[in-house]
Image: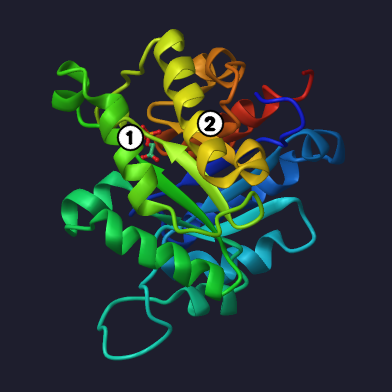
Amino acid sequence: MTPDIKPLVAGNWKMNGARDQLDQLALMSRGLDDELAAKVESAVCPPATLIYVATTLSEDTPLIVGAQDCHAEASGAHTGDISAEMIADCLGELCIVGHSERRTDHGETDASVLAKTVACWRAGLTAIVCIGETEAQYDAGEAEAVLSRQLAASVPDGAKETNTIIAYEPVWAIGTGKTPSPDDIASIHALLRDRLVERFGGPGERMRILYGGSVKPGNAAEILSILNVDGALVGGASLKAEDFLAICEVYRDV
Ligand code: PGA
């Protein structure tokens, strides 16, 4: 947590979930009472096929709906892609960009992630910009250098707390059940905060820095209490309303 920053718990459903998964989304939105919603923002990023029905279902509830990726351009000959404008048209409010699975599976670079972030802003979406080191980079003691480089090159000038959220996701912690030690998370998040403040000043102090990678109900309280951890990006544990809400509940009494 960081004083004066409202945290965000964002679920990334990845390529999971058909229409029957929307029952879980409905349970999530019902579980967010006003008291909890005052403490923490909650979002779900379902597959693109479900965004519009998800925003319809969560209308008038505190649950925010986002997307998992967008194309940098607003429209055109890009078969299979969706634009930030299309996400906004479906009433999505957020978009994850630069997730390590996109960087690995689709060859996305810092430059393309930066362009997608600009696209999010153009469409009025808040971008969740993901960065993270691989296990080899972590083992080689290169995490700080890699993350500094990714942050500098993936986040455009003009980033501020209202248009950009950073997600630190060590690649080796995603879907593995492994997490860095609390001390490691604290020192990486402190480094990211320093870099954001150096570059953006006041907005850098206020930008949210999420941790992602094997966050579950069992470890959420410890991770989310760390200074400069302003919420979580949650994969597997966001598919079940019970688990997702248990992570959000960490903020109820703090
Ligand atoms: P995980 O995924 O929580 O399943 O590790 C996190 C993510 O990839 O955003």
| Residue 102 locus on image (x, y percent) | 26, 54
Residue 16 shows in this picture: no
How many residues crowd around disc 2 within 10 Å: few (fewer than 14), some, or many (20 or more)? Answer: many
The reply to whether discs 2 and 1 touch (Cβ–Cβ < 8 Å) is no
| Residue 122 locus on image (x, y percent) | 54, 75
Q: Is residue 169 above or below residue 216?
A: below
- Position of 30 compared to 159: left or right? right
Q: Is residue 63 above or below residue 7?
A: below
User: Does ligand 1 reach within 8 Å of label 2's beta carbon?
Assistant: no
Q: Report the residue at 27% width, 78% height from top.
A: 80
Q: Is residue 20 above or below residue 131?
A: below
Q: Secondary structure at mark 2?
A: helix
Q: Secondary structure at mark 1?
A: helix
Residue 189 shows in this picture: yes
Q: Residue furthest bottom?
A: 76
Q: Report the residue at 21% width, 24% height from top.
A: 142
Q: Amino acid at mark 1?
A: Leu
Q: How far is disc 2 from disc 1 in space, using C-alphas? A: 12 Å
Q: Residue furthest right?
A: 35
Image quarter of residue 202: top right
| Residue 149 locus on image (x, y percent) | 30, 41
How many residues crowd around disc 1 within 10 Å: few (fewer than 14), some, or many (20 or more)? Answer: many
- Position of 86 compared to 109: left or right? right
Image quarter of residue 213: top left
**Numbered circle sitting on residue 147:** 1
Classify the position of the C terminus by image quarter: top right
**Numbered circle sitting on residue 193:** 2
Q: Report the residue at 37% width, 60% height from top.
A: 114
